[in-house]
Image (cartoon, grey):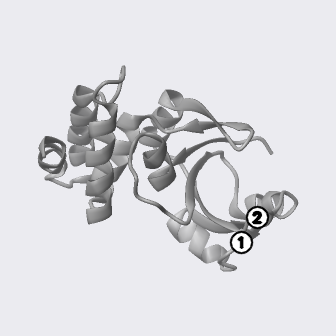
Amino acid sequence: MQARFYLFGAQAAALHGSTRMSADADVTLLLPVDTTALLAALAGRDFAPRVKDEGFLRATRVLPVWHAATRMPIDLVLGDSGLEYAAYERATRRRIGGRVWRVASPSDVVVMKVLAGRSKDEEDVRAIVAAQRARRPGVEMTYVEETLLALEEAIDEAGLVDRWRAWSRR
């Protein structure tokens, strides 16, 4: 089974300038597959589920696994939205541990962090914006704002753009 995937979350934020540490990695998988096939494919590839309940995966679209060789916890998120496919297309390529990974762009990590809205996400957004100021393209402010505005309408959650503006100004 071939899957398109990219790194996002705290590990991607760290690659883009955040200094906050996280014990796990977050990876979005873009593949049309049933959960049973995914679990079977991972079993032969050095991954072990941290949650044995297939119902959890079906309900949340998140599969928490251990990478057996490193014992690193990884949350595999089954992506199925336009936002996740767009993030894949915009992802940068980074060499990590001898392998080239797709990593969500700074702008897409910021969008995801603003959407999550936790205090640790605010820290990440501020650090990414500050670290990316001198880089090109860095954080694409217009893209972030337009994406968050579209998300406000799509998921009926007001305040994302206001949150972004507050977090990016300090």
Q: On screen, 130 above or below 69?
A: above
User: Few, some or many C-alpha atoms within 10 Å of disc 1 (few <14, some 14-19, many ≥20)?
Assistant: some
Q: Which residue is mark 2?
A: 39
Disc marking residue 82: none
Q: Which residue is mark 1?
A: 49
The quarter in which the N terminus is drawn is top right
| Direction top: furthest residue | 136
Of badges 2 and 1, the one in the foreground is 1
Which residue is drawn at the image coordinates 60% and 33% (left, top)?
94
What x and y, as percent, mark residue 115? 30, 53
Between 20 and 35, the one lying in front of the other is: 20
Which residue is drawn at the image coordinates 71% and 42% (left, top)?
3
Between 53 and 116, the one lying in front of the other is: 116
Q: On screen, 28 above or below 107?
A: below
What x and y, as percent, mark residue 27? 58, 52
Between 95 and 50, the one lying in front of the other is: 95
Q: Which mark is first along the chain, 1 or 2?
A: 2
